[in-house]
């Protein structure tokens, strides 16, 4: 159990908290700022990476992910300096994946060439929609033409490019989504993330929804139909889901996100970044201060984190199910038993299998396509009382 994290791998997440504008559906820790001292932020990241490396000496690093916010707003020199210090402080896997998130409105060919030269080898683009009226309703700053042009720039500089789309949007029909998704999959992509629009409290959409001013959202039946259509179309294009919302060709899965879903260890650096770190047999949940100024000032003192939380066996086992059952590959029953100290209830497993929600094969528990539609209910049924 003390080395369980090795079954998931080891990654590093770096959070850049700034955006050009706040999208109305977004509940991430992102902020709009008129001026950013890139030099100060660069030094803060470098000092925090060095501190984290001293806690994890000798670990082989499998992935680095620049998330946000909009990391493509970072100076390429900052990204280059961060990657250089990472390589100085950890041995890295031969196939180290370094991903940078980008919005089409912040993409320039020169910047992408510089990111590539810095060591970034994968880009994830937040396109979100392929029609201009919906892009405006989603608060996006780019047009469809700009998005497609940015995608072409990215493909010219990186072998691996993913992009995100949101569906279940206001007044969106099945026919609308079918045409849009087929257009997306006709592009030269090997990975795509497809998220149903969710209304989160504390967002602009959340406030509008509470006041009854966010109309045209799909009902539960249409939401299920949109999800089923998504699986059918992606499967026909050779882009089967490997996770609830993520589709890829063979070998093109996001290695960094697989660390999360397989319950590996990962360091979170930057405002609001979360992490999981196993030390001396204890697995810790870490969380950085979310306020950018508070985090930046704390970096000089090595005081960017809130108090760490030790995760007990039950918490680890629950997280293992919550994360692992999102994957088409499912979870190992013996690994769950090792984490929790007990096996999953046989009656629950057999009942869920009989009603077509899960499949059992030797040591493997996987969720069926039918089960993925009600995944939260499946997980709740599996968890001990």
Image (spheres, helix red, strand yellow):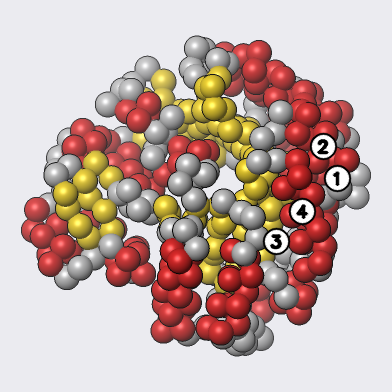
Give the mark toward the camera: 4 or 2. Answer: 4
218 horizontally vs 354: left or right: right
Q: How crowded is mark 4: few (under 14 residues within 10 Å), some or many (20 or more)?
A: some
Rendered image: mark on residue 152: 4
Q: Nearer the viewer, residue 101 or 307?
A: 101
Q: Residue at x 70, y 61 (%)?
A: 127
Mark 3 vs 1, N-terminal side: 1
117 horizontally vs 200: left or right: right
Q: Mark 3 points at which residue?
A: 127
Mark 1 and 4 residues: CB-CB less than 8 Å, in contact? no
Q: Residue at x 33, y 69 (%)?
A: 374
Give the mark toward the camera: 4 or 3. Answer: 4
22 horizontally vs 329: left or right: right
Mark 2 and 1 residues: CB-CB less than 8 Å, in contact? yes
Residue 120, quarter of picture: top right
Against 131, is 103 above or below?
A: above
Q: Where is residue 133 in the image (x, y as percent from the top left)?
A: 76, 79
Q: Distance between the residues labelled 2 and 1?
A: 6 Å
Q: Position of residue 289 (x, y in %)?
A: 64, 39
Mark 2 vs 3, N-terminal side: 2
368 horizontally vs 21: left or right: left
Rendered image: mark on residue 109: 1
Q: Please, what secondary structure does the residue beneath circle 3 have?
A: strand
Mark 3 and 1 residues: CB-CB less than 8 Å, in contact? no
Mark 4 and 3 residues: CB-CB less than 8 Å, in contact? no
Mark 1 vs 4, N-terminal side: 1
Q: How far apart are marks 3 and 1 (CA)?
A: 17 Å
């Amino acid at each position: 159990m003390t080395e369980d994290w090795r079954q998931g791998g080891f990654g590093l997440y770096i959070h850049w908290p700034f955006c050009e504008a706040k999208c109305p559906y977004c509940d991430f820790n992102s902020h709009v700022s008129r001026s950013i001292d890139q030099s100060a932020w660069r030094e803060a990241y470098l000092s925090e990476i060095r501190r984290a490396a001293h806690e994890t000496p000798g670990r082989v690093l499998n992935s680095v992910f620049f998330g946000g916010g909009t990391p493509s707003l970072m100076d390429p020199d900052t990204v280059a300096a961060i990657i250089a210090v990472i390589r100085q402080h950890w041995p890295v896997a031969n196939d180290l994946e370094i991903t940078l998130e980008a919005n089409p409105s912040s993409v320039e060919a020169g910047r992408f060439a510089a990111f590539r030269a810095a060591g970034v080898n994968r880009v994830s683009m937040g396109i979100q929609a392929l029609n201009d009226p919906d892009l405006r309703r989603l608060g996006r700053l780019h047009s469809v033409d700009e998005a497609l042009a940015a995608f072409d720039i990215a493909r010219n500089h990186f072998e691996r490019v993913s992009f995100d789309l949101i569906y279940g949007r206001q007044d969106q029909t099945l026919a609308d989504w079918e045409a849009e998704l087929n257009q997306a999959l006709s592009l030269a992509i090997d990975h795509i993330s497809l998220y149903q629009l969710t209304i989160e409290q504390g967002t602009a959409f959340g406030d509008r929804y509470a006041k009854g001013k966010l109309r045209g959202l799909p009902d539960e039946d249409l939401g299920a139909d949109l999800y089923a259509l998504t699986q059918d179309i992606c499967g026909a294009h050779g882009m089967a889901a490997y996770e609830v919302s993520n589709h890829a060709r063979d070998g093109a899965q996001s290695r960094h996100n697989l660390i999360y879903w397989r319950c590996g260890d990962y360091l979170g650096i930057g405002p609001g970044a979360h992490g999981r770190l196993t030390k001396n047999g204890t697995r810790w949940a870490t969380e950085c201060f979310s306020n950018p100024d508070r985090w930046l000032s704390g970096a000089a003192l090595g005081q960017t984190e809130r108090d760490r939380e030790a995760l007990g066996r039950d918490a680890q086992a629950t997280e293992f199910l919550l994360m692992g059952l999102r994957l088409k590959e499912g979870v190992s029953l013996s690994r769950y038993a090792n984490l929790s100290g007990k096996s999953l209830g046989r009656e629950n497993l057999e009942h869920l299998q009989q009603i077509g929600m899960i499949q059992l094969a030797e040591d493997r528990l996987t969720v069926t396509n039918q089960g993925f539609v009600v995944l939260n209910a499946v997980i709740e049924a599996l968890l001990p009382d």
